Image (cartoon, rainbow, N blue to C red):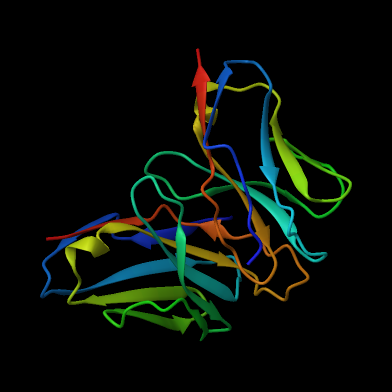
C-alpha cells in the first residue's frame, strides 16, 4: 500500500493561509491524492482530490508536485472551524489513512 | 446528497451481548466500507463490500460479522466483543474501486461503541 508522510501537528493564525504538506514518494501512476479532514467526534469529511494537476474548490486548493511525490493542501484563510486532523490519502485500489496532521487555529 | 447515515450514534454493550450497527446511503454507490477508529488514531479499514459481495476482510476477528443486504444498506453484527473493541466505527460508501478512478469515499458520523 502506498504510504504518506505528514507532520504530526501544525499551527496557524486565524485568517492566515495554511499550507499542509504531504510526502508520498512511492505513489504509482494511477494513485489519486485525496485529502480528508476529521473534526472531533465526527466522521472524515472529503476536502479535495487530484491526480496530476493543481485543483481548486470552495474549501481548499491542492498543489501537486510535478513528480507527484508530494502535495500541499492550501487553506486560503484559516478559520476556527478549520481546526481538525487532516489526512492525505493515496487511493489506488483501496483507502489507507496515514497518521494525519492535527491543525490548531489560533484566534 | 452525499449523506451516509449510521445508527445508533452511541452503543454500550456487555461482552456477552449481541448487537448490530447499521449504515445506509442513497447515493447509488456500489461499494461500502467499515472502519474502526481508536482514540487519537487514524481510521483502520475492516471490511469492503463491492456490488454487495465481501471483497476485503482485513483479518478482522470473527466476533465482527458484516452483512450487505442490498446496495444501500450495510450492517455490522457484533457478538462476544472485548473491552479493547471499544472504538468509533465508521461506515463509508463510494463507487467501486477500479484502480483507475478517484472513487471518493463519503463517511458517516460513526457509532461510538463501548464494551463493558
- In percent of width and height, residue B107 lies at 50, 57
Q: Is residue A13 above or below residue A56?
A: above
Q: Looking at this view, is A32 or A41 the one in front? A: A32
Is residue A47 toward the left or the right of residue B48 in the image? right
Q: Residue at x 28, y 60 (%)?
A: B8
> How many numbered badges does the structure rendering display?
0
Is residue B7 toward the left or the right of residue B105 in the image? left
Q: Looking at this view, is A30 or A55 the one in front? A: A30
Q: Which quarter of the rendered picture does the C terminus of chain B lie within?
A: bottom left
- In percent of width and height, residue B83 lies at 18, 62
Q: Is residue B92 above or below residue A42?
A: below
- In percent of width and height, residue B60 lies at 37, 77
Q: In the displayed image of the protein, which residue is found farthest to the front?
A: A25
Q: Which quarter of the rendered picture does the N terminus of chain B lie within?
A: bottom right
Q: Residue at x 66, y 21 (%)?
A: A77
Q: In the displayed image of the protein, which residue is found farthest to the top?
A: A107
Q: Residue at x 41, y 52 (%)?
A: B109
- In percent of width and height, residue A6 lies at 60, 42
Q: Looking at this view, is B79 or B75 the one in front? A: B79
Q: Looking at this view, is A72 or A35 the one in front? A: A72
Is residue B115 toward the left or the right of residue A2 in the image? left
Q: Is residue A64 above or below residue B68?
A: above
Task: Please identify the quarter of the rendering in which residue B114 is found.
Answer: bottom left
Amino acid at each position: 500500500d502506498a504510504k504518506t508522510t505528514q507532520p504530526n501537528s501544525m499551527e496557524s493564525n486565524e485568517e492566515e493561509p495554511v499550507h499542509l504538506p504531504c510526502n508520498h514518494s512511492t505513489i504509482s501512476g494511477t494513485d489519486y491524492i485525496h485529502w480528508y479532514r476529521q473534526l472531533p467526534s465526527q466522521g472524515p469529511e472529503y476536502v479535495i482530490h487530484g491526480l496530476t494537476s493543481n485543483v481548486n474548490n470552495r474549501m481548499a486548493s491542492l498543489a501537486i508536485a510535478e513528480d507527484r511525490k508530494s502535495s500541499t493542501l492550501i487553506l486560503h484563510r484559516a478559520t476556527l472551524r478549520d481546526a481538525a486532523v487532516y489526512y492525505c490519502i493515496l487511493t489506488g485500489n483501496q483507502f489507507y489513512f496515514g497518521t494525519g496532521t492535527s491543525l490548531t487555529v489560533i484566534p | 446528497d452525499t449523506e451516509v447515515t449510521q445508527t445508533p450514534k452511541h452503543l454500550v454493550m456487555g461482552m456477552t451481548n449481541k448487537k448490530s450497527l447499521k449504515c445506509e446511503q442513497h447515493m447509488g454507490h456500489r461499494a461500502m466500507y467499515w472502519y474502526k477508529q481508536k482514540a487519537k488514531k487514524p481510521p483502520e479499514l475492516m471490511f469492503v463490500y463491492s456490488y454487495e459481495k465481501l471483497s476485503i476482510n482485513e483479518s478482522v476477528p470473527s466476533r465482527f460479522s458484516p452483512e450487505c443486504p442490498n446496495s444501500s444498506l450495510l450492517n455490522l453484527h457484533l457478538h462476544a466483543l472485548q473491552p479493547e473493541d471499544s472504538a468509533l466505527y465508521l461506515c463509508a460508501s463510494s463507487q467501486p474501486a477500479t484502480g483507475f478512478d478517484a472513487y471518493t469515499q463519503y463517511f458517516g458520523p460513526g457509532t461510538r461503541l463501548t464494551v463493558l
